[in-house]
Amino acid sequence: MGDVIELDPVDTLGAGAIGRPGERSFFIQAGKDGARLTVLVEKEQVALLATEAVAFLDRLADDFPDEGVEPDASEAEVHEPAIPLFRARMIGLGFEPDRRLVLLELRENSDEDEDEEDADDEVDRDDDGFVARIYATRSQVRAMAARGAAAVAAGRPTCPLCEQPMDPSGHRCPRWN
């Protein structure tokens, strides 16, 4: 297994983007006791994490009622300088019922990477990459999801014909031929 970073529990958790639309980089950040972990992610990962996290928390609420704290999306911002430790290839969600904390696991390498290495017989088990395990409250995760969804939505508008992002300087739609 690679280097494991465990933040249990975090003081802050955020998701968002830095840069101009069309040139943005997306990040997940977690902070504990003044230390900050920044992980580079893809826009699609942030969008999927936001929707899946909310659905996951809604399913949990049936068996484990929410603590009643309203999420504050302003606390879930990504702060600069955003220098990532690694790029997440795989993101997972879990729940620890005894402590009522959500686990957000970010992995630098995915299981698919290991399968490809096995096929090539070039297995290096000592370099599985970074694994970050972030334990947060449900309200922190909801705030992170809301902030991440807002960052994704704040991108370039999509063309109504080809559904591709439009640049402010103009758009050459392939459907106009």
Image: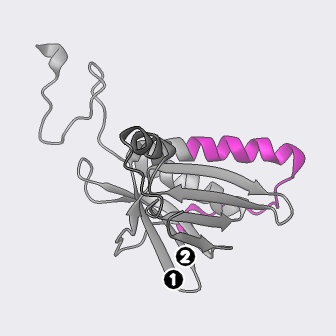
Tag 1–tag 2 contact (CB < 8 Å): yes
Judging depth in this view, the residue of 18 and 29 nearest the camera is 29
Q: Secondary structure at mark 2?
A: strand
- Crowdedness near tag 2: few (<14), some (14–19) or many (≥20) residues, C-alpha within 10 Å: some
Residue 69 rendering spot, x and y as whole percentages: 76, 63
Single out the residue that lies furthest toward the front: 121
If the image is split into quadrants, where does the C terminus sit?
A: top left
Residue at 42 percent across and 46 percent down: it is 152
- Give the residue pinned by disc 2: 31
Residue 2 rendering spot, x and y as whole percentages: 50, 65
Left or right: where 162 falls relative to 56: left
- Crowdedness near tag 1: few (<14), some (14–19) or many (≥20) residues, C-alpha within 10 Å: few
Give the numbered dot on residue 35: 1
Is residue 34 positioned above or below 2 on the image? below
Residue stretch in magenta: 50-74
Residue at 82 percent across and 66 percent down: it is 99
The stretch drawn in magenta includes residue 143: no
Residue 169 rendering spot, x and y as whole percentages: 12, 41
Left or right: where 26 falls relative to 100: left
Residue 56 rendering spot, x and y as whole percentages: 70, 44
